[in-house]
């Protein structure tokens, strides 16, 4: 079984300050982990992914995430928030199964608000 | 190029109408997906196609009928929908069923 917990449904930061979006996961197997961003009325855009290589993963738009197995966490960070970062962020865990498909589990999402 | 396109962007239909949603990718991906996303919720998987064959149907009502005519195209045929089916319908594709999924912009469906 696998699950994803996004610890905050809503995060508010001031423009230019750091961003931290928290994600904890549970998986019986070695998972792949992703962060996707969704702007209002848009599809999901891949920010970054962890697939058992380097534990610190750099993504687009200055975002990065660190895989911590001991803490079962995959928190998303950015040093300085920009107004365009305001969006919904989804943490996703996947694992392959014997049928050749991924079991994909989405977190509930964290809405990031950036205050000017 | 990691683009998945979806048409139309918006669709309004009555409960007796028949309509179709279209999804296209030219990345050579062999797995394609339909998701349904209600407001303020994460996407929910509906169907998975792998090598043009339906591989997963997450107990979706028969008023939703997927079709994969070729490796680049995925359709979702809609008939006799209910107002509660109003949602954002997202298409995604991946190189294989085990690879990273890339999403399209979605079709916003409203059922009156």
Image (spheres, coloured by chain):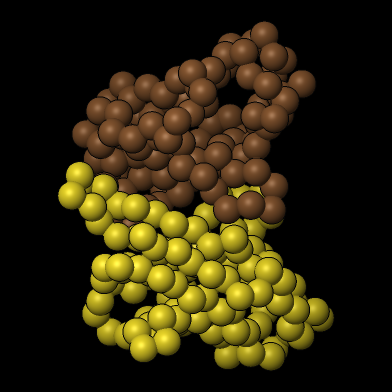
- Compare residues B10 and B41 and report the one nearer the observer: B41
Residue A101 versus residue B9 in the image, above or below = below
- Chain B: give its colour: brown
Residue B69 versus residue A58 in the image, above or below = above
Report the chain shown in yellow: A
Residue A98 percent coordinates (x, y): 18, 49
Residue B91 percent coordinates (x, y): 46, 40
Residue lying farthest to the top in this orientation = B16
Residue B52 percent coordinates (x, y): 25, 29
Residue A58 versus residue A48 in the image, above or below = below
- Compare residues B42 and B33 and report the one nearer the observer: B42
A100 sits to left or right of B106: left
Q: Quadrant of the C terminus of chain A?
A: bottom right
Q: Which residue is located at x 41 percent, y 81 percent?
A: A72
Count the marks: how many? 0
Q: Which residue is located at x 26 percent, y 68 percent?
A: A29
- Compare residues A54 and A91 and report the one nearer the observer: A91
Residue A20 visible within the image: yes
Residue A84 visible within the image: no
Q: Which image quadrant is residue B15 in?
A: top right
Residue A105 versus residue B31 in the image, above or below = below
Q: Quadrant of the N terminus of chain A?
A: bottom left
Q: Which residue is located at x 36 percent, y 45 percent?
A: B93
- Compare residues A73 and A62 and report the one nearer the observer: A73
Residue B5 percent coordinates (x, y): 47, 40
Residue lying farthest to the right in this orientation = A116
Q: Which residue is located at x 57 percent, y 71 percent?
A: A6
A78 sits to left or right of B100: right
């Amino acid at each position: 079984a696998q699950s994803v917990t996004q610890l905050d449904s809503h995060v508010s930061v001031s423009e230019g300050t750091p961003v931290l979006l928290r994600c904890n996961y549970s998986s019986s197997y070695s998972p792949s982990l992703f962060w996707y961003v969704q702007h209002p009325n848009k599809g999901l855009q891949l920010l970054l992914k962890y697939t058992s290589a380097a534990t610190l993963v750099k993504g687009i738009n200055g975002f990065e995430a660190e895989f911590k197995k001991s803490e079962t966490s995959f928190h998303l960070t950015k040093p300085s928030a920009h107004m365009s970062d305001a969006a919904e962020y989804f943490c996703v865990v996947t694992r392959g199964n014997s049928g050749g498909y991924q079991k994909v589990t989405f977190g509930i999402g964290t809405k990031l608000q950036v205050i000017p | 190029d990691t683009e998945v396109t979806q048409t139309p962007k918006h669709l309004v239909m009555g409960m007796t109408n028949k309509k179709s949603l279209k999804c296209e990718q030219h990345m050579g991906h062999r797995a394609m997906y339909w998701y349904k996303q209600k407001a303020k919720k994460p996407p929910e998987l509906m169907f998975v196609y792998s090598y043009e064959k339906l591989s997963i149907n997450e107990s979706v009502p028969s008023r939703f009928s997927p079709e994969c005519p070729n490796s680049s195209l995925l359709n979702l045929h809609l008939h006799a929908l209910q107002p509660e089916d109003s949602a954002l319908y997202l298409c995604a594709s991946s190189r294989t069923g085990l690879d990273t999924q890339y999403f399209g912009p979605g079709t916003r469906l409203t059922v009156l």
